[in-house]
């Protein structure tokens, strides 16, 4: 799928087919995330791919979905994600770094930039979209609950979760009339209002 078309078509999907995703595609998603921009090129992010039914079911318990349309916004029974990519911040990688400047080594503390997470997540979701794989990026999550079954070391911090699967619902851009709330129609199609281009673009002057 051509990139511009994939960007226009991508929406958050919350009902999925019971069709497995090839592990090679999941690896490519992570490779796309690995190459995303990173502040100071620190590259603090790591990615945990979850594919087994047991772990997917466990992760699912700790996610909150689509607040505007709860509880209808949660995946229906039998339509849960078939894979997840958990975005992690490795705190050891960002605790201290050495940067050479004018041949002098300067040690400084560095906190991970959330723009790293955003760029990596978008790369994952756009690659997935290009392959017909739907996604939903989730930040309303129980991080401690997710950590427990995965025996995660303390230096890894859970940031967010991307749910993945082949789509079993439709989502489309709706005309923006003021409210930002997305909504389900009677056919179960999700409508997502987006501000029009003319309202957000400025060229050479405000």
Image: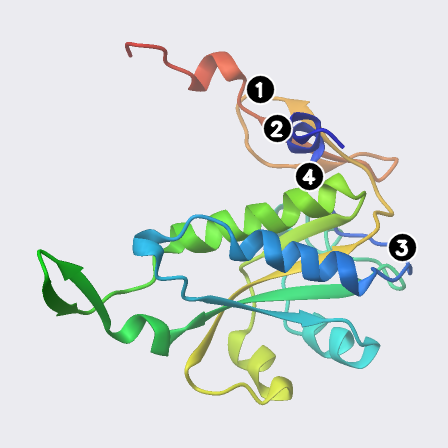
User: Measured along the vertical axis of the image, is residue 55 above or below residue 108?
Assistant: below
Disc 1 and disc 4: Cα gap in Å? 19 Å
Please state which of residues 140 and 23 is positioned toward the viewer in this rendering.
23
For marks 1 and 3, the one nearer the N-term is 3
Mark 4 = which residue? 11
For marks 4 and 3, the one nearer the N-term is 4
Mark 1 = which residue? 177
Disc 4 and disc 3: Cα gap in Å? 16 Å
How many neighbours does mark 2 have within 10 angstroms: few (below 14), some (14-19), or many (20 or more)? some
Q: Say which quarter of the image contains residue 105.
A: bottom left
Horizontal and vertical percent for residue 179?
A: 54, 29
Q: Do the numbered discs 1 and 2 sit on residues whose CB atoms are within 8 Å?
A: yes
Badge nearest the viewer, 2 or 4: 4
Mark 2 = which residue? 193
Q: Say which quarter of the image contains residue 113.
A: bottom left
User: Measured along the vertical axis of the image, is residue 7 above or below residue 18?
Assistant: above
Please state which of residues 105 and 36 is positioned toward the viewer in this rendering.
105
Horizontal and vertical percent for residue 47?
A: 57, 67
């Amino acid at each position: 799928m051509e990139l511009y078309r994939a960007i226009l078509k991508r929406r958050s999907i919350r009902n999925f087919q019971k069709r497995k995703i090839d592990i090679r595609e999941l690896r490519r998603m992570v490779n796309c995330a690995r190459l995303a921009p990173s502040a100071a090129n620190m590259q603090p992010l790591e990615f945990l791919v979850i594919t087994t039914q047991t772990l997917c079911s466990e992760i699912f318990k700790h996610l909150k979905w689509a607040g505007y349309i709860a509880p209808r916004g949660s995946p229906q029974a039998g339509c849960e994600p078939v894979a997840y990519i958990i975005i992690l911040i490795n705190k050891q990688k960002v605790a201290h770094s050495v940067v050479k400047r004018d041949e002098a080594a300067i040690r400084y503390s560095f906190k991970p930039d959330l723009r790293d997470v955003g760029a990596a997540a978008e790369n994952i979701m756009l690659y997935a979209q290009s392959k017909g794989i739907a996604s939903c990026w989730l930040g309303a999550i129980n991080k401690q609950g997710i950590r427990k079954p995965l025996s995660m070391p303390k230096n890894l911090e859970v940031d967010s979760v991307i749910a993945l699967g082949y789509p079993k619902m439709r989502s489309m851009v709706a005309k923006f009339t003021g409210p930002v709330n997305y909504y389900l129609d009677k056919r179960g199609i999700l409508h997502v209002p987006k501000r029009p281009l003319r309202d957000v673009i400025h060229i050479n002057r405000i």
